Amino acid sequence: MTSVGSGLTLLQTCALSLLVFTGASQFALVGALAAGGNPLTAAAGAFFLGVRNAFYGLRLSQLLALPRAVRPFAAQWVIDETTVVALAQPTRRSARIGFAVTGLTLYVLWNLTTLLGGLGAEAIGDTDAWGLDAAGPAVFLALLAPMLKSGVERAVAGLAVLLGLGLLPVLPGGVPVLVAALAAPVVLCVEGRRGAKSGKGGDR
């Protein structure tokens, strides 16, 4: 619904959901495009958000040990939920079953609800009049907030918000998202220096 409300057609919305099976990247892409951003910068922001799935894949490739012919198809289902379910299983066989069942169920439901939401958005007309333009950011924040448990994670999120909102009026749409991605290395660098200094002080 958010995607159609942001200007994408129903066909584009469904294709995006089928090909980019990760919610955070989809919301980032749609949000950047809705703000008038360049498609390349919007895609780059979505790509960086989806990079974590590659690290999941490294762990799951060892755990599941799937045949090479199956791996490209299984890679499409490497997301937070399938990773958690697979890692929680006691045996390789149960991990494979958990991964497959979770991936298939979520993929079907995700794309079905995308279709229904797109049809609903077309039916109600102007989604801005209903305030649905804020649905994407609201959902993204709702997914992100529970994950910010440590001080470092909250610092990264806070700096990213400051960079994104602060640069929004002066940079093209989609670019502030890419700049906000620098929050993580900056905070980690500062944290590393603090740790190094405290270590030297302890040696004395």
Image (cartoon, rainbow, N blue to C red):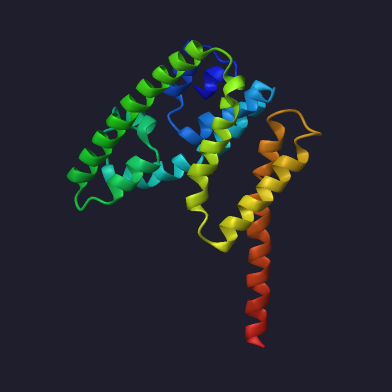
Residue 22 seen in this snapshot: yes
| Furthest residue in direction front, as rendered | 130
Above or below, 21 relative to 91: above
Residue at image position (28%, 30%) is: 105
Viewer-side residue, 143 vs 80: 143
| Furthest residue in direction bottom, as rendered | 204
Residue at image position (33%, 47%) is: 84
Viewer-side residue, 143 vs 163: 143
Above or below, 140 relative to 1: below
| Quadrant housing the C terminus | bottom right
Residue 66 seen in this snapshot: no
Left or right, 62 with reference to 118 = left
Viewer-side residue, 151 vs 194: 151
Task: Point out residue 1 in the picture as x, y percentages from the top left corner.
Answer: 49, 21
Q: Count the marks.
A: 0
Residue 79 falls in which quadrant of the image? top left
Task: Point out residue 195 in the picture as x, y percentages from the top left corner.
Answer: 63, 71
Residue at image position (28%, 36%) is: 102
Task: Point out residue 80 in the picture as x, y percentages from the top left corner.
Answer: 40, 42
Residue 37 falls in which quadrant of the image? top right
Left or right, 128 with reference to 165 = left
Task: Point out residue 122 in the picture as x, y percentages from the top left corner.
Answer: 50, 12
Residue at image position (63%, 58%) is: 188
Above or below, 190 relative to 33: below
Viewer-side residue, 25 vs 125: 125
